[in-house]
Image (cartoon, rainbow, N blue to C red):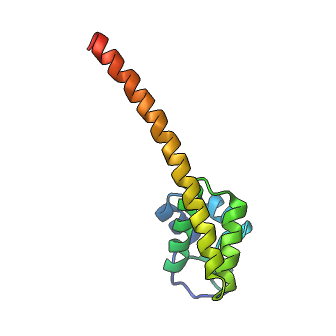
Amino acid sequence: MTTVQSPGMTIGEAAARLGLTTHTLRYYESEQLLLGSPGRTAAGRRRYDEDDVRWIEMVQRLRATGMPVRAIRAYAELCRAGAGNEDQRLAVLEAHRDEVRRHLAEVTDHLDAINHKIAGYRTVWG
């Protein structure tokens, strides 16, 4: 844990910037989804810097695209380990990308079916 004087954002400021609750930020930290613990003031209050925010934005993207917390934790662990495991990190992201693409194709098929149904109604009652 790094102690900082006052630079960075409070947990409330970081949460507002990220569109999250402070509870969610604490959850991400407790689940070891962050690259490291945020800095702390001498009084022990969290301070988030730009690197923290960028990482949390990535975590949000991974969650929003359906990556399980355990997979994000594993990816974060690889990143925290440093150089030498880039091939593993790449494999995690490529596998997730492939899953997102499969899901996107499925949703696109559903959307096409809905659009077809709408077209049918517009033809009859349009």
Q: Is residue 24 left or right of residue 101?
A: right
Q: Position of residue 120 (x, y in %)?
A: 35, 18
- Residue 63: quadrant of the picture: bottom right
Image point (49%, 78%), residue name:
50
Residue at position x 66%, y 83% from top? 85
Q: At 67% from the left edge and 69% from the top edge, which residue is drawn? A: 33
Considering the image in quadrants, where does the C terminus appear?
top left
46 up-or-down from 123: above or below: below
Lateral position of residue 76 relative to residue 124, left or right: right
In which image quadrant can residue 45 be found? bottom right
Q: Nearer the viewer, residue 57 or 12?
A: 57
Image x and y of residue 42, in percent: 66, 86
- 70 on left or right of 34: right
Residue 35 in picture, x, y percent from top left = 64, 77
Q: Is residue 108 visible?
A: yes
| Front residue (pair 8, 44) | 8
Question: Does the image show residue 49?
Answer: no
Q: Is residue 66 above or below residue 54?
A: above
**40 is higher (above) or lower (below) than 30:** below
